[in-house]
Image: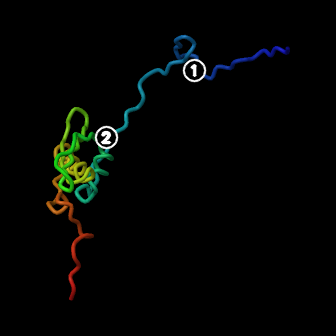
Amino acid sequence: MISRASSFVSLTDSNASTKDGIPSIQGQPEQKPAKKLPENAALMNPIMLLNQMHPSAKYEELGKTGAPPHIQFTIKCIVGNQSFVGTGPNKKAARKQATFEACKTLLGIQYPPDILQGTSNKEAPMETS
């Protein structure tokens, strides 16, 4: 059996402290600056905007009520220590409603009523001349 001697070259700074032979990093990592609210924030999808401004936002299904086809879903959006509840005929609509409330409270964005009701220009009938 052949025995090899291994050599170890330390790549750590000589001033770095060690604990159990593992180097530790001195100081704290640089904090990222807070994201700036986009100029067109009121035109952005609220879920996308909240995800951009508060990436730690979580969603939780609280339940559903009613019998098919009249089911109402309830979703809770949790951002930090605040929570916002939304209801809708499907999970997507309930999540969107909860996110509207979060954007209104946390970011000060008031969405137009047509967006809140789920209608958009894509769904509006075209005028004929």
Residue in the image at 53% along x and 13% along y = 18
Q: Quadrant of residue 118?
A: bottom left
Q: Nearer the viewer, residue 71 or 29?
A: 71
Q: Crowding at label 1, few (<14), some or many (≥20) Cα neighbours within 10 Å?
A: few
Question: Label 1 belongs to which residue?
Answer: 13
Give left or right: position of 46 versus 23: left
Task: Please say if 34 is above or below 45.
Answer: above
Marks 1/2: CA distance? 31 Å
Left or right of 31, for residue 39? left
Task: Please tell me whether mark 1 sits on a helix, a strand or a loop.
Answer: loop
Q: Earlier in the sequence, mark 1 or mark 2?
A: 1
Q: 10 Å neighbourhood of mark 2: few (<14), some, or many (≥20)?
A: few
Nearer to us in this view, 20 or 73: 73
Residue 69, x across and y down, in percent? 20, 56
Q: Residue furthest top?
A: 20
Viewer-side label of 1, 2: 2
Determine the image quadrant of residue 35. Answer: top left
Query: As displayed, is residue 33 above or below residue 15?
Result: below
Q: Residue at x 24, y 53 (%)?
A: 90
Residue 33 x %, y %: 34, 39
Amino acid found under the numbered disc labelled 1: Asp
> Split into 4 quadrants, where in the image is the N terminus?
top right
Q: Residue 34's mark?
A: 2
Residue 129 in percent (x, y) is at 21, 89
- Apparent side of residue 83 relative to residue 59 in the rendered image (left or right): left
- Residue extending farthest front: 67
The structure's colour scheme is rainbow
